[in-house]
Image (spheres, rainbow, N blue to C red):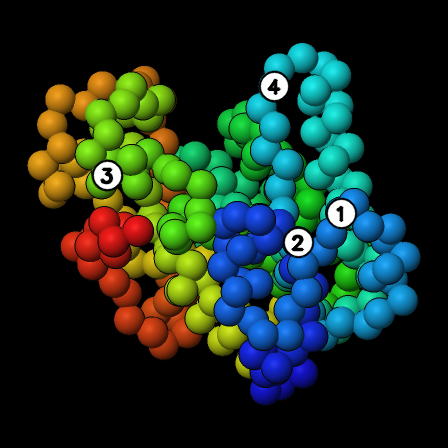
Amino acid sequence: MSGFDLLNAKCLISGTSSGIGKFLIQKLPHAESFDRSAPISKYKKNTYDLIIHCAYDAGSLRGHKNIYEQTKSNINLVEELCDINTKVFIFFSSIDVYPKEASGNLLDFELGSGELLNRHAFFKIVGESIVVSKVKNHIILRPSLMIGKNARVSTLVNIVKGNKGPFTLTKNSRFNVITHDQVLFCIQAALKVNKKGIVNLCSGLEFSLEDVANYVNNKNITWGKYKYITPKIENSNAIQFYGADDIKMSELISTIKDW
């Protein structure tokens, strides 16, 4: 698979209504959106060069029934996609599968170890397990905060846009940030070198929400009580690893303001 040409590959992408999935479907000319309402047989009769699973059911309603439905939704979709013929399968997981205070080289850490995982990270770990068990040629992407025009509006973007909350996060919450363009670059680079397994998808750009607020002169923000910290993992700067340049916070903020 050396020299995999992503721009000419026959791709199937899930989760194309927003976020990284929408970005990728717009960038890849031979990509097809996965329609969950269509019978799975529609896709099983085809063979794809690549499946990229971006979709995630983020339902946050409380109660046993809602958790059960969300569990079925996320797990069943991963299993269905894994049963479709493809040369390579890419699964978007999250850097948050690592313990909150993680540091060092934890690629082989015990899944689910450490403090209690949030629901999003839990479903990502389960999804990883399904993909690894059912698909030989796979890439598990564990990205930090992905930023793009089509992404769901984050606290970071709200602050840049001048919103003052109230927010859930504390001002000293720290994020590693990677843009959608950088994600696409890393996918292309990983496929070209026939990468398999786990890729920690981070950049060299990291800052606190307070750093952003000060830079854009957004004052009198109502902060929350939850402190988020992106786990620090050795060799997680995929941008640097694959030979591209990181962007600066000023460049990112300028881009966000133009959206």
Give neighbour class at mark 4: few <14, some 14-19, many 20+ (Cα, 10 Å). few
- Residue under circle 4? 61
Any part of residue 123 in sight: yes
Are there few (<14), some (14-19), or many (20+) residues within 10 Å of tag 3?
some
Quarter of the rendering containing residue 134: bottom right
Residue at label 3?
Answer: 161
Looking at the rendered structure, the kind of residue marked 4 is Leu
The span from disc 2 to disc 3 (Cα, nearest Å) is 29 Å
Q: Along the polypeptide, which appears first: circle 2 or circle 1?
A: 2
- Which residue occupies 33% across, 34% down? 155
Dot 4: element: loop
Label 2's element?
strand
Q: Which callout, 1 or 3, points at the residue further toward the start of the chain?
A: 1
Question: At label 2, which amino acid type do we have?
Answer: Ser
Q: CA distance from mark 3 to mark 4?
A: 28 Å
**Quadrant (top left/top right/bottom left/bottom right) for the N terminus:** bottom right
Q: Nearer the viewer, mark 3 or mark 4?
A: 3
How far apart in space, not on screen, are marks 4 and 1 (Cα)? 21 Å
Q: Disc 3, disc 4: CB below 8 Å? A: no
